[in-house]
Image (cartoon, grey):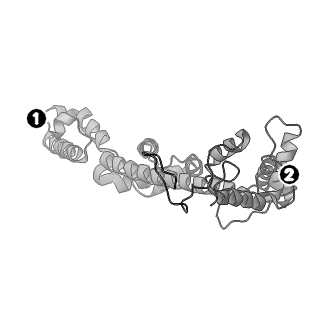
Amino acid sequence: MAEIPAGTETSPASETSPAAPAAGWVGNTGELGNGAPEAVQALLDNKKWTTVEQIVHGYTELEKFKGAGDGVIIPKTGDENYAEKIGEIFNLLGKPKTAEEYKYSTDSETQFDPELLKGFKEFALGENYTQSQLEGAINFQLDAVAAQEEIIAQELEKNKVEDITELKQIYGANYEDAMRDANLVSDKHKYTDQLNAEGITDFPIVKQMLNHIANLEAEDGIAPGGVRPVTKSLQEQLSEIQANPAFMKKLHPEHKALHAKFMEINHEIANSGQAPKRMQA
């Protein structure tokens, strides 16, 4: 029996080395290794595919996109007839052949100008919109318009409240009468429709202007609508008292009453927030 040289290791006859990956880069169980042809390896790296199953799945999805056996090739930018070839691909995805074939209906209260909708359909066709993409684009615009209209409505309501607050500070207890005078003058001279159209009906400066016209007409004996004498703002009343000679002369019989009225109006102005800061402190 031959001797086995010392230091030589042996292994059982049944033990074998692992099988090499099939084709050099595809394992026996379908895993992908290195060593694929350069073009194939670039695709695997780009798609992050690591198994044959993933390759098959990717091809299956591609067939769903283009239709098995149709032989659709994705063109590259700059290719001859690029736009036409891209259009053919979007036709497969559901793009209508003509702008008139696009359909759109909505429950929105927003009304479409037929010419505007027609123009958008033509634009959509040129941009290769599918039917669902056109619907999504229009719905997005409608939602944006609705959101903007809500913001504007909230802002207008906020401004209206602020305008009323300012006018109440100006006219104090006479606010209701002053607004009635302003509205009567506006209707009498046919300003109302124009003011409404411009959205400035409730602007404090407009109401004050109308009330000033009412005051001028009242001085001429033309009360607005013939209903009642016109009221003046607190500041106007204060100025009139200060201009009255009786207010300046302490010995005048009417001085005491005018001074009391002067103090009363000053107190109302201070409470309304119209007074200078030093008076409100």
- The quadrant where residue 238 appears: top left
Query: Is 147 placed left or right of 38 in the picture?
Result: left
In this view, the residue in front, 144 or 161, is 144
Query: Is 92 placed left or right of 7 in the picture?
Result: right
Whether residue 104 appears in this view of the structure is yes
Seen in the picture, residue 14 relative to 35 is either above or below; the reply is below
Query: Is 271 placed left or right of 105 in the picture?
Result: left
Give the SS element for disc 2. Answer: helix
Residue positioned 78% across, 47% down in the render: 123
Dot 2 or dot 1, earlier in sequence? 2
Give the SS element for disc 1. Answer: loop
Whether residue 184 appears in this view of the structure is no
- Measured as percent of width and height from the top left, residue 34 is found at 62, 44
In this view, the residue in front, 213 or 155, is 155
Q: Quadrant of the C terminus?
A: top left
Type of the residue with mark 1: Leu
In this view, the residue in front, 78 or 48, is 48
- Measured as percent of width and height from the top left, residue 84 is found at 87, 45
Report crowding for label 2: few under 14, some 14 to 19, many 20 or more residues within 10 A (C-alpha): some
Q: Which residue in the structure is indicated by mark 2?
A: 88
- Measured as percent of width and height from the top left, residue 153 is found at 50, 54
- Measured as percent of width and height from the top left, residue 2 is found at 52, 52
Residue positioned 71% across, 39% down in the render: 38
Identity of the residue furthest to the bottom in this view: 107
Q: Which residue in the structure is indicated by mark 1?
A: 251
Q: Which mark is residue 9?
A: none
In this view, the residue in front, 241 or 79, is 79
Residue positioned 51% across, 56% down in the render: 1
Identity of the residue furthest to the front in this view: 1
Marks 2 and 1: CB-CB under 8 Å?
no
